[in-house]
Image (cartoon, grey):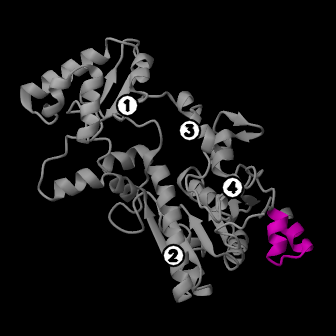
């Protein structure tokens, strides 16, 4: 079997919900041995999120494939000691509690990294490990609100539009994986691990880099990519379906104008005021004169950056994604490829196995189970 990039890397996963599990799923896809600690009797709350896939949630299955699950009561001192022993054998620990929670259980970065300086300790939180909001509760909608994302995405009435996906959570998971890989690479040089502090709010702001930089530099908020110009917009067709147009470069703009039958607009791409509004109206009425698929046939061999706005079920079924794998690891490595390493584990499926690997004798494992520390 082909070697994977993270073969031999052991990850202790103390996270739940979306950001942390998505991060550690990516690491598992790349070959890491991810041990997920869940608290009995219910485990990760995503196990109960509908719809079901077998005995568990489809969401849980997607976010936790290829991991091993152990059920440990971290609220007990004995359970916390189990986690400390497992952390001593891990390369990476990922957690998503509020700042200070794990430190009070003897599982904070200072304690664990003092015992093992090579440990990479990743904390994923809403606002980061310090600052005035560090201890504040929040969800994705709060982070995209505070990060300027919602304020920059409004409907015709000015109301902020919630995105279909969890922007902050998914971005945070990606950035956590990025930070962990950087810390592991640094450890190759220094021999020491470090704390990786990932803020979901700052992840949202990272997505806002283009408008933020222009604003901080004293300029106006950009309008080129917000639907204010005809060359970069979304148009409704006669059948009520939509086309996305991204004809920014002059060659694409010219191809768009000529295919629409309006070559006179070629030199007027960046016009302003009333002239710009007239072009927007003209293009809107032109696209509205025919069904979406009729336009797609016209643009099939034309490089004008015109694509259909797909519903999610259409997107999942498109040939491009089916050819490369729907919801597969989004990073392709030619020499150490990622692969789906197996299904998500049942709650506590690997408890005895993992504890035995950590040196616990069978009698002690049975005693821990009888005491309710593990399940």
**Dot 2: within a 10 Å radius of its alpha carbon, few (fewer than 14), some, or many (20 or more) residues?**
many
Any magenta on residue 357? yes
Please name whichever residue, 173 or 318, is drawn nearer the observer in this view of the structure: 318
Q: Residue at x 30, y 23 (%)?
A: 259
Q: Nearer the viewer, mark 4 or mark 3?
A: 3
Residue that appears at 19% across and 45% down: 222
Q: Where is residue 26 in the image (x, y as percent from the top left)?
A: 60, 57
Q: Quadrant of the N terminus?
A: bottom right
Q: What stretch is highlighted in magenta?
A: 351-368
In screen coordinates, is 345 left or right of 18?
right
Determine which residue is flagged by label 2. 183
Which mark is nearer the camera, 1 or 2? Answer: 1
Q: How far apart are marks 1 and 2 (CA)?
A: 45 Å
> To which residue does mark 1 refer?
302
Image side of residue 305 versus residue 91, left or right: left
Element assignment for label 2:
helix
First-in-chain label (4 vs 3): 3
Instruction: Classify 10 Å Cα crowding around label 1: few (below 14), some (14-19), many (20 and above).
Output: some
Give the vertical position of 111 relative to 307 (above or below).
Answer: below
Q: Magenta segment, principal secondary structure?
A: helix
């Amino acid at each position: 079997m082909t070697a994977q990039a993270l073969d031999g890397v052991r990850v202790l996963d103390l996270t739940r919900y979306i950001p942390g599990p998505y991060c550690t799923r990516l690491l598992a896809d790349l070959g890491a041995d991810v041990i997920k600690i869940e608290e009995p009797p219910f485990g990760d709350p995503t196990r109960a999120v509908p719809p079901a896939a077998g005995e568990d949630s489809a969401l849980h299955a997607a976010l936790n494939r290829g991991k091993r699950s152990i059920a440990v009561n971290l609220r007990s001192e004995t359970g916390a000691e189990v986690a400390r022993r497992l952390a001593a054998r891990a390369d990476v620990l990922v957690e998503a509690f509020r700042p200070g929670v794990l430190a009070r259980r003897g599982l904070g970065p200072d304690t664990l990294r003092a015992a093992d300086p090579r440990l990479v300790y990743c904390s994923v939180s809403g606002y980061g490990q310090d600052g005035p909001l560090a201890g504040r509760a929040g969800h994705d909608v709060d982070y995209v609100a505070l990060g300027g994302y919602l304020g920059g995405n409004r409907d015709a009435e000015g109301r902020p539009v919630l995105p279909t996906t969890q922007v902050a959570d998914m971005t945070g998971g990606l950035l956590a994986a990025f930070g962990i890989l950087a810390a592991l690479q640094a450890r190759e040089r220094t021999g020491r691990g470090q704390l990786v502090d990932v803020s979901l709010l700052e992840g949202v702001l990272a997505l806002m880099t283009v408008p933020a930089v222009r604003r901080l530099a004293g300029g106006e908020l950009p309008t080129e990519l917000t639907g204010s110009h005809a060359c970069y917009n979304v148009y409704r067709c006669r059948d009520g379906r939509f086309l996305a147009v991204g004809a920014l470069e002059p060659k694409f703009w010219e191809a768009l104008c000529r295919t629409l039958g309006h070559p006179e607009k070629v030199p007027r791409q960046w016009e302003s005021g009333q002239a710009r509004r007239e072009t927007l109206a003209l293009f809107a009425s032109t696209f509205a004169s025919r069904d979406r698929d009729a336009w797609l046939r016209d643009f099939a061999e034309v490089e004008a950056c015109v694509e259909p706005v797909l519903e999610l079920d259409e997107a999942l079924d498109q040939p491009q994604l089916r050819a490369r794998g729907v919801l597969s690891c989004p990073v392709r490595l030619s020499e150490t490829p990622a692969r789906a390493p197996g299904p998500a584990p049942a709650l506590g499926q690997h408890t005895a196995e993992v504890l035995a690997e950590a040196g616990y004798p069978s009698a002690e494992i049975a005693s821990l189970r009888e005491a309710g520390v593990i399940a």
